[in-house]
Image (spheres, rainbow, N blue to C red):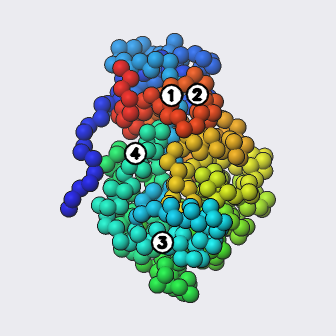
Amino acid sequence: MMQTMKPAIPLPSADGLWTGLCLAPGAAPGAALEADAEAAIVVAQGAIRWVGARSALPAEFAGLAPHDGGGALVTPGLVDCHTHLVYGGQRANEFAMRLAGATYEEVAKAGGGIVSSVRATREADEDTLFAQAAPRLEQLLADGVCAIEIKSGYGLSLEHERKQLRVARRLGEAYGVTVRATFLGAHALPPEYAGRSGDYIDLVCREMLPALAAEGLVDAVDVFCERIAFSLEETERVFQAARSLGLPVKLHAEQLSDMGGAALAARYGALSCDHVEHLSAAGIEAMRQAGTVAVLLPGAYYTLRDTQLPPIEALRAAGVPMAVSTDHNPGTSPALSLLLMVNMACTLFRLTVPEALAGVTVHAARALGLQETHGVIAPGMPANFVLWNVRDAAELAYWFGQQPVCAVVRQGRIAVGAAA
Ligand code: DI6
Ligand code: FE
């Protein structure tokens, strides 16, 4: 089979002593050091061994191979916790339709929308899908992303969903990046099941999900619960199938209307409820109790020129963790910069800078069930961190269209930049 992946050039190891660092607020919660104190990170065998004030560095690490950070600001590797990165084609034509006044729902009803990406995805073979997704992944990685979720949902049959999920796995291997593959078979009704959504949900629950899970292709299960997609009852059937296989769930919830999806998802211990523009007070309370993360997707809000803001103030007051993600997809969020989403989360949704940065690190990791390994810089975790060419963490939210990365350590390797 033709392999369209990049040649495997081994990246340099990040093992050694990193100095000349300034830790961003919240980057290393366990490390006690004063603001502006020089920080150091020890990486051994690809994992964080120690992090703290350089002045407190244990003598045993002093002689390790040096990496000079040159005063860079350091954050944990970013986590993009909601993407639909693997699909065939693109949908710029719909952008034009919407500019002419059509709504997302009208475009979908006119045969465009998700179903048009389904057509293009079914027509593409695995290598083609890989080759189309790879440059998009490279864009996200250049922004400091070290872990990413990739959903299926443009195949809508066992064969084509498998193809998407296999590409997601291959991308993770080829680029040395943590990939969580989420099965979103219940994303849209495939045309061959028109008028028979119950039968399609049967197929999802009885055939597609068990087969793909048995092949090790599924880390979590998602559903698009919406008027133009699947009902609350159908969503619950998929959740039951996931539960019987021991798989965690998440939900596209209350994006276009309040379906009560968040409360249902919380009852199933969902990792996250995503979009949540129309989330109710009852939904927030259910998420709080279940420890479910609210994933905010400003790229989709912006693209759809939505005016219904997610209930940020109420989520904040309830202490529901808020993550921020690109929702990269060809219809409603063709976004390829997680840092731009940080800017938009602040500007459009009025998150504070620390909230937005937590949203693409610690809370995003939790939205994927990766809180033990990603989202903060802590001893024992794989080495994933980013050196930024800025003095102040607020600059990460303030600039837009800029790429202030100076180095990325991903999975213990220097993936971007070569800090000496
Ligand atoms: N919500 C979204 O934002 C994407 N899917 C979903 O359920 C949109 C997918 C598309 O339009 O292709
Ligand atoms: Fe989405």
For the residues bearing labels 1 and 2, Cβ distance under 8 angstroms: yes
Query: How far, Cα to Cα, is label 3 from label 2?
Result: 42 Å
The kind of residue tagged 1 is: Trp
Residue that mark 3 sits on: 116
Residue that mark 1 sits on: 388
Residue that mark 2 sits on: 24
Query: How far, Cα to Cα, is label 4 from label 2?
Result: 24 Å
Residue drawn 60% across and 17% down? 36
Q: Residue 66: percent from the left, percent from the top?
A: 36, 18
Q: Earlier in the sequence, mark 3 or mark 2?
A: 2
Query: How far, Cα to Cα, is label 3 from label 4?
Result: 25 Å
Q: Could you tell me if residue 419 is visible in this image? A: yes
Callout 3 secondary element: helix
Closer to us: 251 or 270: 251
Closer to us: 99 or 143: 99
Residue drawn 42% across and 50% down? 136
Callout 4 secondary element: helix
Q: Quadrant of the C terminus?
A: top left
Query: How far, Cα to Cα, is label 1 from label 2?
Result: 10 Å
Q: Could you tell me if residue 243 is visible in this image? A: no
Q: Residue 184: percent from the left, percent from the top?
A: 50, 67
The kind of residue tagged 4 is: Glu
For the residues bearing labels 3 and 2, Cβ distance under 8 angstroms: no
Which of the two marks, 3 or 4, is nearer to us in this view? Answer: 3
Residue that mark 4 sits on: 138
